[in-house]
Amino acid sequence: MREILGRRRSFGRRGGSARLDAALTCATEWQWPVLPGAGLRGAGDRGPRCACPDPECAVPGAHPFDPGLLAATTDARMVRWWWTNRPAAPVLLATGGRAPCALSLPAVAGARALAALDRAGLRLGPVVATPTRWALLVAPYTLERLGELLYAQDRVPSSLRFHGEGGYVVLPPSEIGTGQVRWERAPGRTPGSRPKGAAVAPWLPDVEVVLDALVEASTSAPDGGSRLRH
């Protein structure tokens, strides 16, 4: 029994260390503002419960609570303090501004969409996969530009969500109510050399390119696009 408990504690420390390392990489190397998510506590009849006060929380663990979203930072000292005190907290990326934005789809639709975009030869950036949704990270965009892009489309998959200014995306290696968060497409660097000592954030595609490709994949699907609406 002691051996089993020891293994569990060791696993918890490693998991917490991995989240701290991931948060520090995002904040200090990539200059992506992060903050800890609400996290989980115990298990109810329907699985793990969110640590927030809402007993009916629709996204257990995977949202800001305390601190709020405006606290997101790239400061290494703050990041270390957060995850030292809350090692199991999910890592949340505050989207928009100079940080990446994202487009997300249900997991099944996301997998099919990625296959279609690969066949089209589109270069994708990082893709975050949770058991229920996949998020394609894109270069920062404003809400005004997004509105213009959506207005230019004849139709957009109804289950497509946009994570821009004032939004957030949960990042690996977080664990949330629906399960483990992972990279379906790991972050890659922008081609070319960099000045010595300069941080290089992962390469991100333009939102217009990704949106156009997703809409095209939807409208050209044999089933009328329902594959991207699951």
Image (cartoon, rainbow, N blue to C red):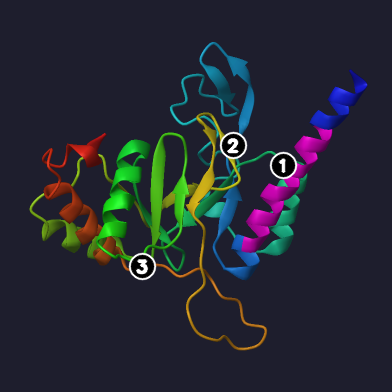
Secondary structure under tag 2 reads strand
Q: Which mark is residue 88?
A: none
**Region of the chain picked out in magenta, as a range:** 9-25
Residue at position x 70%, y 63% in the image:
76
Mark 2 vs mark 1, CA separation in Å: 10 Å
Give me the C-alpha separation between circle 2 and circle 3.
27 Å
**Closest to the observer: 159 or 85?**
159
Q: Is residue 4 magenta?
A: no
Given the current orientation, which residue lies at the most extreme front position? 119
Q: Position of residue 111 (x, y in %)?
A: 35, 44
Res. 175 mark: 2
Q: Looking at the rendering, which quadrant does residue 2 occupy? A: top right
Please name the residue that numbered disc 3 is placed on.
205
Helix, strand or loop at label 3? It is: loop
Q: Secondary structure at mark 1?
A: helix
Q: Position of residue 173 (x, y in %)?
A: 61, 46
Residue lying furthest left: 154
